[in-house]
Image: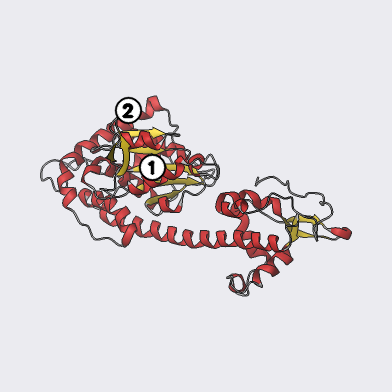
Amino acid sequence: MKSTIGKYVVLPSEEALTAVTLWVAATHIQTALQHAPRLAVMSPTKGCGKSRVLDVLYETVHDPMMTVNTSPAVIFRTIGKIPPTLLVDEADTIFGPKASGDSEILRGLLNAGHQRNRPAWRISGPEHKPTPFPTFAMAAIAGIGDLPDTITDRSVVLRMQKRKPGEKVAPFRTRYAAPELNALRDRLAAWLGPLRSTAARMVPSMPVEDRAADTWEPLVIVAELAGGQWPAQARAACVAMTRHEAAQDEQTSLKTRLLRDIHRVFERANNPEALPTLDLVSALIQDADAPWSEHGAKGLNAYHLSNLLRDFGISPANYRFEQGRQAKAYVRNRFLDAWARHCPDLLQAEPPSQPTQSGAPASPALGKPPTGGPVGGLPVGPPGRPAGPRRTL
């Protein structure tokens, strides 16, 4: 199974490949689990393979329900005692800055469905009777950019990247790939089906705590059922990937803080069209309540600022200010997309006025950036069977 998934997609690490393999297997024992981990498949741009991951999952998980745009009501009525595996693509259109009110309902559903016995109550039927709808179901959610924090906190997270020139995958054509993947799916179901009651009783030791332990426990349970090297590989993947996300969360929080502080600097300067890099850095490190004076060895500098803003597609450029003075500067309009995505409340609170020219540049220099937004296998029989060779996927 593991080698077959790796045949069609390039995942961020060997640990990620282990995690996806175990996650797929865990969908076949959902009814025995207390938690339904989400699989968050995120990429910074298109063309990183996130949709191909969902294609492979669709052919291998238990009872897949693929959707790119559905209402919460449909999902409420689809999940039952034997839930499907939800596969949600283009999540950035659902949870992005222009999302509808249904996105919050769907986010709540996905959060509640991480744990058993968290139904959603709705008024239903001609008698308008309060009715509980099950929410418990495993789900893979793919999109460009970050998902809501409450979802990633309940997820095994895959941060996809574009393939390097030397990284090759087999072409995925449903008519050729589906029979192979479906055969593996059926073998997984046949192996794990009789082990559901065993899985329900298992309480494996976990190398992490709290919600991370809840999320990874189903994968470790499958690994324990498989035996061999799988338990060690599962726990190693758990530790490596949760540590990576902890570091990512810290860095993301820092970058979001930076966006907010830059917005405040522009606001205090009466929203000029651009600010010189040195002036912006100076204003940031002078804020006694901010972490920038202690960033790095000697405080935030122009290099640090550029590096922190790179992921948002924001960079400085030569800019001609009043009286012909030219300097490296940050153009305010280049921040609008990042503010809208990561700090939408800032733009909503702004008065509908144009940036003033007080202390602002008189005209752009040649090359001024555009003012728009930035640009091994699982066994197929019960472990420990005395007779016959050990078969693997």
Q: Give the SS element for disc 2.
A: helix
Dot 2 crowding, Cα within 10 Å, few <14, some 14–19, many 20+: few
Residue 183 is left or right of residue 247, and the answer is: left
Dot 1 crowding, Cα within 10 Å, few <14, some 14–19, many 20+: many
Reading the image, the residue beneath label 2 is 179
Residue 320 image position (x, y, % from top left): 83, 56
Cα distance between the residues tagged 2 and 1: 22 Å
Q: Give the SS element for disc 1.
A: strand
Residue 322 image position (x, y, % from top left): 86, 59
Colouring mode (rainbow / by chain / secondary structure / one colour): secondary structure
Instruction: Tell me which amino acid carries mark 2.
Output: Pro
Residue 388 image position (x, y, % from top left): 13, 40
- With respect to residue 242, does 101 lie above or below? above
Residue 290 is left or right of residue 181, and the answer is: right
- Tally the marks: 2
- With respect to residue 290, does 189 lie above or below? above
Residue 23 image position (x, y, % from top left): 32, 45
Residue 113 seen: yes
- With respect to residue 312, does 168 lie above or below? above
Which is more N-terminal, label 1 or label 2? 1
Nearest to viewer (mark 2 / mark 1)? 1
Q: Quadrant of the N terminus?
A: top left
The residue located at (56%, 59%) in the rendering is 256
Reading the image, the residue beneath label 1 is 140
Q: Residue furthest left?
A: 386
Residue 297 found in image quarter: bottom right
Instruction: Tell me which amino acid carries mark 1.
Output: Ala
Nearest the viewer among 48 and 121 is 121
Residue 158 got which mark?
A: none
Q: Residue furthest front?
A: 127
